[in-house]
Amino acid sequence: MFRVFSKAWRPAAVFLGVATLVCGLVYPLALTGISQVFFKQEAQGQVLYNKQGKAVGSRLIGQSTTDPKYLIGRPSVDGNASNLSVFGDKQTKSVARRVAYFKSIDPQNKNAVPQDLVTASGSGVDPDISVEAAYYQAGRIARLRNVSYATVKKCIDKATTSPLIGPKIVNVLEVNISLDDLK
């Protein structure tokens, strides 16, 4: 009986051991090695550094800031994702509160606040905003930093990319690093 049992289970145990070794060790190490060689920046989280060489954040994760002298990104709903209904009372109040905030920090700007500045992204950590939202803030940033609008626009344009699908986007952290480097 034990002999029959052992004959049946031995191949299964060997297969489990080999599969565990290949899938749990060899494959992950191979992918890590390949990604470090061919996609080093992506594999390391696309960390961005300031002029002093200090890591200040990732190009892939939105940084929360409310300081008016910086480009302000999409709201993150207290660090959580948002899937509120566009017709819901909670969403309506949140949008109205955010519009009031942008009007309070830049009363000179009479333009409508772009939608992506007042609605949270689905992930809650969107690192990019629309070009329209970035330019909307450029005048305020220029005045508060005592630099020209063209200088702020140049920082925005430098951080603007065109994704494969959709409109151009601006990485908020890249712009803020460029703004700090103006000093």
Image (cartoon, rainbow, N blue to C red):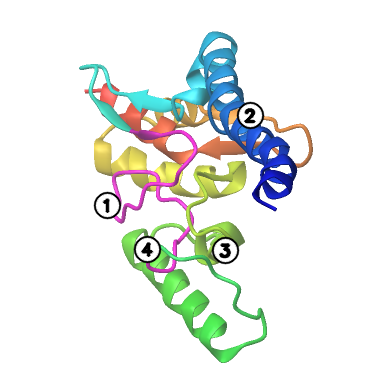
72 magenta-colored? yes
Q: CA distance from mark 3 to mark 1?
A: 20 Å
**Residue sitting at 49 percent across and 44 percent down?**
127
Distance of label 1 from label 2 (alpha carbons): 55 Å
Q: Give amino acid for label 4.
A: Pro
- Residue 85, position as x, y percentages in the image: 65, 81
Quarter where residue 143 is shown:
top left
Few, some or many C-alpha atoms within 10 Å of disc 3 (few <14, some 14-19, many ≥20)?
few
Picture quadrant of residue 87: bottom right
Does the magenta run of residues contain 8? no
Give how far across and how far down residue 113 sits, in percent. 54, 62
Q: From where the camera sits, is residue 158 visible?
A: no
For this view, does 129 lie left or right of residue 61? right
Instruction: Report the residue marked by disc 4.
Output: 107
Q: Which callout, 2 or 3, points at the residue further toward the start of the chain?
A: 2
Q: Which mark is residue 39?
A: none
Stretch in magenta: 57-78
In front of the other: label 2 or label 3? 2
The residue singled out by tag 3 in the image is 112
Vertical arrangement, residue 95 with respect to residue 129, above or below: below
Quickly name the residue at label 2. Answer: 18
Q: SS class of the residue under badge 3? A: loop
State which quarter of the image contains the C terminus: top left
- Mark toward the start of the polypeptide (1 vs 2): 2
- Amino acid type, residue under disc 3 in the picture: Ala
> Would you call the spot at circle 2 few (<14 residues within 10 Å), some (14-19), or many (20 or more)?
few
Label 1 is placed on what type of residue?
Asp
First reached walking from the N terminus: tag 3 or tag 1:
1
- First-in-chain label (4 vs 2): 2
